[in-house]
Amino acid sequence: QVQVAESGGGVVQPGGSLILSCSVSGRSFRINDMGWYRQAPGNERELVARSVSNSGTYIVDSLKGRFTISRDNVKNIMYLRMSSLKPEDTAVYYCNVVGYHANGDLFDVWGQGTQVTVSS
């Protein structure tokens, strides 16, 4: 079974920075793509960025220049580096991982989320 865990959230002042991590664990799996989503109170969950194996990365236009995404394919960890944070970035940030088990079965797993609060 594949497990996903986010970390790195917290409270930061406007203009500050945070690095979120998404760790993937389990046995005999291959990751196809990973993504960061966020959900603010009262809002739907929205895409922040995705990293697709052999295809590169994608960040939503409104966050380009402030957010970057990267992956360590050896350690199965994905990072979201956030800078110049704004109060409207406050949300629970979720990691999503899509891949295949050794038997060929597809998996699509979400983490529990990590809270990011931008406030003075």
Image (spheres, rainbow, N blue to C red):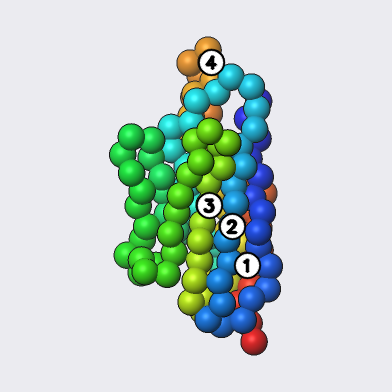
Q: CA distance from mark 2 to mark 3?
A: 6 Å
- Residue occupying the point 62% across, 42% down: 23
Of labels 4 and 3, the one closer to you: 3
Nearer to us of marks 1 and 3 is 3
Residue holding disc 1: 116
Q: Amino acid at mark 2?
A: Leu
Q: Earlier in the sequence, mark 2 or mark 1?
A: 2
**N-terminal of the two: label 2 or label 4?**
2
Badge nearest the viewer, 2 or 1: 2
Left/right of residue 116 with respect to residue 66 in the rendered view = right
- Are the residues tagged 2 and 1 within 8 Å (C-beta)? yes
Could you tell which of marks 4 and 1 lies nearer the N-terminus?
Answer: 4
Alpha carbons under labels 1 and 3: distance apart:
14 Å
Secondary structure at numbered mark 1:
strand
Say what secondary structure mark 3 lies in: strand
**Residue 79: mark in rendering:** 3
Residues tagged 1 and 3 counted as in contact (Cβ below 8 A): no
In depth, the one of 24 and 39 nearer the eye is: 24
Three-letter residue code for mark 3:
Tyr
Q: Secondary structure at mark 2?
A: strand
Q: Between disc 4 and disc 3, whose residue precedes? A: 3
Residue carrying label 4: 102
- The picture places residue 81, in percent across and down from the top left corner, at 51, 61
**Secondary structure category for the residue under label 4:** loop
Q: CA distance from mark 4 to mark 1?
A: 34 Å
Q: Work out whether residue 87 can be spotted.
A: no
Q: At which x and y percent is residue 2?
A: 63, 30
Q: Which mark is residue 65?
A: none
In contact (CB < 8 Å): disc 2 and disc 3:
yes
